[in-house]
Image (spheres, helix red, strand yellow):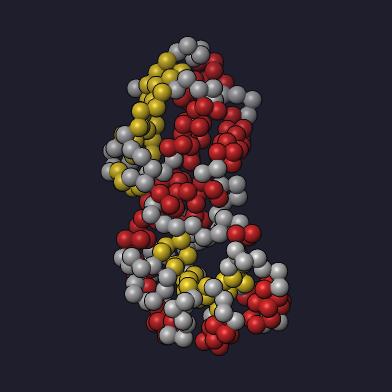
Amino acid sequence: MNPITLKHIIKQALAEDLGMGDWSSQWLFDSTTQKSGRFVAKQSGIFSGQKILEQIYTALGGGVEVFWSIEDGQAFEEGSVLTKVNGPVSTLLSGERVILNLLQHLTGIASSTQDLILRLDDPNIKVVDTRKTLPGLRMIQKYAVRCGGGFNHRFRLDDGVIIKDNHIAAAGGIAKAVEMVRKQQGHMIKIEIEVETLNQVQQAVDAEVDVIMLDNQTPDQVKELRKHIPKSIIVELSGGINPNNIAGYKNCGADVISVGWITHSVEACDISFYID
């Protein structure tokens, strides 16, 4: 993770939650009062968020010792103590809500990503995320996907060219759109094109794009369309794929399945914090 971006995310989160200060903790305890605490999992999952927790305590003034029982990407069971902490009780309490919000969310993403991979049960297909992320949290959400065993799609629009349906409509067709991009394209930039029909697949193949995205296709439709795409072109599936139907895409011939669900609709993992 980019440390500058991470600091910015944490600064924004703390500013939103603390306001002028945590009066409850500051007025109950002075800065010398030390306590221990523990973060406990209320359900099983895949953990993500070590650096987030550590950096939040640092941003609050430091002085907190962290004793990890787990690393990012590791599985845990219900009741597991994920980490123990010791330090100024005012710092532990002031950071509690922001830490839990982010740990629960990121661990939920990592756990859901791993669940999708297990349901798919196809080592030849990579499960990747999308840009359907929460504003300001993209970097850490995509990090959580990697903790769950998934891969990252574009971080930003300038990471690559994806010509989608609206681009095609505005440009006047697939061939025209690819031609226009190629006039500007650097040698390091790949071109991906979104298609839905056999005719569009054939146009994309003729245009010699790098990646063809089959959008909103059933497993049987994917298998049929794959027959018309050379092995040299990467095939990505997207649109409506979730835990309930991903198993049906096993052995369908795709190389990549992109799933927006893993960053915009996952449930948080239940984690609690207790002062000892």
The foreground one among 256 and 59 is 256
Residue, far front? 187
Q: How many marks?
A: 0
- Relative vertical location of residue 17 with respect to residue 74 in this rendering, above or below: above
Q: Viewer-proximal residue, 256 or 39? A: 256
Residue at image point 62% right, 66% down: 187
In this picture, residue 10 sits left or right of residue 169: left
Find residue 123 and report its image quarter.
bottom left
Quarter-of-image position of residue 124: bottom left
Residue 238 x/y as whole percent: 49, 70
The x, y position of residue 203, in whole percent, is 58, 85
Res 169 seen here? no
Residue 22: horizontal and vertical position, in percent? 56, 24
Residue at x 33% of width, y 41% of height: 42
Quadrant containing the C terminus is top left
Report the residue at 35% width, 57% height from top.
115
- Residue placed at 48% from the left, 41% from the top? 102
Q: Position of residue 122 (x, y in %)?
A: 33, 67
